[in-house]
Amino acid sequence: MSVNVKIPFHLLVQTIYLLECIDVSKYDLSIKIDYENILDFLCHKKASLQLRETYANIIKAKDDDSRHTARMRYLQEKRELWGDNS
């Protein structure tokens, strides 16, 4: 079953923090792989949501200078998240 769910952003951040505190070095390789996949996905989701907020700052900018600054910040964050090919 493939169903999307919504959770509050603060819960996403808390979940990532909690997962980062767990030491999985003693567990089986399959657990380690699942752990890394889940943590990577959640961290990427968090970064995507932050990128969306950065994009919104372009639209909310009050003048051309602040819009340009917001756009440069957005492009930098986008490059960091998706790499140079996006």
Image (cartoon, rainbow, N blue to C red):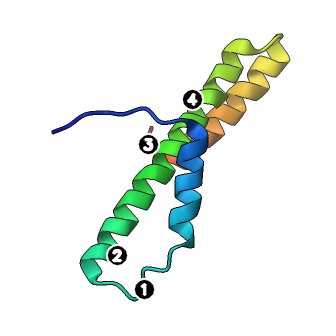
Residue bearing mark 3: 85
Q: Nearer the viewer, mark 2 or mark 4?
A: 2
Residue type pointed to by label 2: Lys
From the viewer's perspective, tell me whether residue 65 is left or right of residue 19: right
Residue nearer the viewer, 55 or 17 = 17
Q: Nearer the viewer, mark 1 or mark 4?
A: 1
- Residue placed at 43% from the left, 58% from the top? 40
Residue bearing mark 2: 32
Looking at this view, name the residue that lies furthest to the bottom: 26
The percent coordinates of residue 79 (x first, y second) are: 56, 43
The image's mark for residue 25 is 1
The image's mark for residue 52 is 4
Identify the image quadrant of the C terminus.
top left
The percent coordinates of residue 35 (x first, y second) are: 37, 67
- In the structure shown, which secondary structural element does the residue marked by tag 3 occupy? loop
Residue type pointed to by label 4: Arg
- Residue placed at 34% from the left, 84% from the top? 27
Residue nearer the viewer, 83 or 55 = 55
Between the residue at mark 2 and the residue at mark 4, the CA separation in whole angstroms equals 30 Å
Tell which circle, 2 or 3, labels the residue nearer the N-terminal end: 2
Dot 3: few (<14), some (14–19), or many (≥20) neighbours within 10 Å? Answer: few
Between the residue at mark 2 and the residue at mark 1, the CA separation in whole angstroms equals 7 Å
Dot 2: few (<14), some (14–19), or many (≥20) neighbours within 10 Å? Answer: some
